[in-house]
Amino acid sequence: MNATHDTVGPAMRAAAEDVCGEYMDVIPSDVRNLLGFYMSLRKLLVECGVHDFSFQDLQKPTHERLSKIFSYIINFVRFRESQTGIIDEHFNKAETTKVRIETLYMENQDMEARLEEMKRNRKAMESHVAEKVRRNQELKQRLRALQVSQTEVMARYDGLQKKKDELTGVLEDKTATAIHLRQESAKLRPYVLQSPAALQATLTDLGTTLSTEKAQIDSLDRRARALQTSTDTFGVVSSDVASVSKILEEISTELLKEEEENVKNARQRDALSERGNNVREVEREESLLKRQLGKYNERTEKLREGSREKAQAAKERMEELRAVHRTLTEERSEKGREMERRRVRIEQTEKKVCCSVLPYRRSTLMRDRWWISRRISRMKYTTRMTSSSRWTRISSCTSRRWSSRCEGL
């Protein structure tokens, strides 16, 4: 059993800690180890066929009980030695399955750890994605407001540009009119000097016209300054529009980054679902391996029972075939003696026929003799082939059955 204090002690100590907790010293270590050894020994004896093993057999054994237990153990050991190949094969399969189960269990633990880590990363990514979505919504609202304000500014800029063009045209017309009036006044000045009253009236008209022109020029200057102010305002608005365009470009860049992050999150979700499927596949394979191990154990027991039954049947069949072999041998020897007697009789008959025939019937007798010898040889060959074919069929059947029995064993 390879049972020592080092193999039994730790397991029983752990069991005592689970049962008694901090009061594990209530049960001495020797008692614990003895109970653990007793349970292992009882399992072994139950497999050997001793179903009434008790603690009394360890504490105070009797001669009869000890002899019985040793007899069962010796029988079990002999059976195990006779079935060493099969036991080693299934033991190796069980060890391979155990190693595979341990490997799958470790892989399952690693997968679970990675799954937990991926869940934590997913939660962190979800919070980050929620923050990005909120920021994206704010940027979208700001972008819409800026687009509305940009539309209004552009409409106002177009209106002011049109008004500027109109006022510039009016200013050019007024300037051309003033230049034309100066030229006309220069032409009329010599005529005005000849009449003081007319000159006074002309001067009055010219003063009035001049004041009117000055008022118009002042108004035009104010309009020009207003237009310059509007132009400066348009420059500021253009710079604002350029900054808004830059913000829009940044927002589009952020949106592209957001889409890339969404794609990465989708890939991670797919990888997470794939890992979950792998974990479920590993659990399914583990359950399948356990069921296969149970089936292999049942098949091993059935094969053992079948090998015992086949061995017994082979022994019985061997005895029957030996009896048949003896019978056939006797029949064959009897047939041989009978054939020998017939051959002697035939030879004597041939000699008598050869001595009693007439010379003129020699050719006929020779033909008859050839026919008789041919028939005799045919009878010999038929008899020999009948006996040999029968023996061949029996021996071939016997050899096939014996080989099948040997393969079954």
Image (cartoon, rainbow, N blue to C red):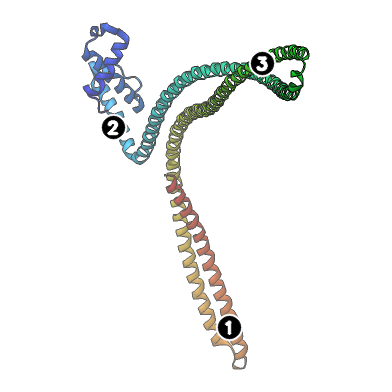
Q: Position of residue 396 (x, y in %)?
A: 49, 57
Q: Is residue 144 above or below residue 101?
A: above
- What amino acid is labelled 1 in the image? Trp
In the image, taking residue 136 as reference, residue 311 lies left or right, namely: left
Of badges 3 and 1, the one in the foreground is 3
- Left or right position of 25 against 135: left
Classed neighbour count for the residue bearing mark 1: other residues with Cα under 10 Å, few (<14), some (14–19), many (≥20): few
The residue at which mark 2 appears reads as 74
Which of 285/378 is in front?
Answer: 285
Amino acid type assigned to the residue bearing label 3 in the image: Arg
Q: Is residue 327 left or right of residue 64?
A: right
Residue under pointer 3: 223
Alpha carbon distance from label 3 to label 1: 160 Å
Q: Earlier in the sequence, mark 3 or mark 2?
A: 2
Q: Within the image, what quadrant is residue 173 found in?
A: top right
Quadrant in which the N terminus is drawn: top left
Whether pointer 1 and pointer 2 mark residues with C-beta atoms closer than 8 Å, the reply is: no
Looking at this view, is 67 or 283 the one in front?
A: 283
Q: Which residue is mark 1?
A: 370
Q: Are marks 3 and 1 in contact (CB under 8 Å)?
A: no
Q: Residue at x 24, y 17 (%)?
A: 33
**The one of 85 and 335 positioned closer to us in this rendering:** 85
Q: Quadrant of residue 349?
A: bottom right
